[in-house]
Image: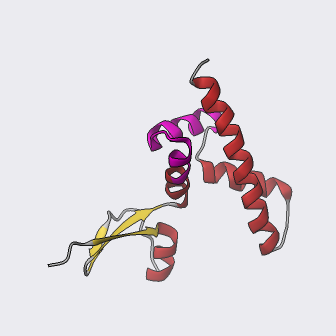
Amino acid sequence: MLAPTSVVVDRGELAAQLGRSTEREPDFVIGDRVIQLKTPNDLLVERLAGHFDISRDDLAAAVLRRYGRDLISERDARIEDIGPMTVRERTARRGHVTRQLVAELRKELESSSGP
């Protein structure tokens, strides 16, 4: 028997595919695949925690301390402040703002780790 294969799926994309909300549903199994529901913020924090070589919880706490909300909310708020733009411009701006957030978090983490 084959071991289940874990597949990470964005919760929003899955909800769109299913045509309903998945917010209250736990991870579940379809056939031999374990579907791990993660929000876009979960995916970003997971990636950045690996980049900074810290735990996801430590990074999430640093983000909350600095911004008072999650990374995706902060990124999207900054983009909203810019005003209307095309889809292409918005995609490019997301990348720029995300890089800016990463630089800010790097400084935050360096200053909180001491000399």
Residue 19: give x, y in percent of width and height.
47, 81
Q: In this view of the protein, which residue sits in the foreground, 20 or 11?
A: 11
Dividing the picture into quarters, in which one does residue 55 lie? top left
Look at the image and tell me in which quarter the N terminus lies. Answer: bottom left
Q: Residue furthest left?
A: 1
Seen at 65% across and 37% down, the residue is 106
Residue 16 locus on image (x, y percent): 51, 78
Q: Quadrant of residue 91?
A: bottom right
What secondary structure is the stretch in magenta mostly built from? helix
Q: Quadrant of residue 84?
A: bottom right
Q: Is residue 98 above or below residue 55?
A: below
The boundaries of the magenta stretch are 47-67
> Which quadrant: the C terminus?
top right
Residue shown at 64% from the left, 52% from the top? 73
Residue 77: % across, % down: 72, 52
Front residue of 33 and 26: 33
Residue 54 on the magenta segment? yes
Comparing 63 with 12, the one in front is 63
- Seen in the picture, residue 99 relative to 105 is either above or below; the reply is below
Hey, which residue is sitting farthest top in the picture? Answer: 115
Q: Residue at x 85, y 60 (%)?
A: 83
Q: Residue at x 78, y 65 (%)?
A: 92
Determine whether 94 is above or below 28 in the image: above
Magenta stretch encompasses residue 98:
no
Q: Position of residue 54 (x, y in %)?
A: 48, 39
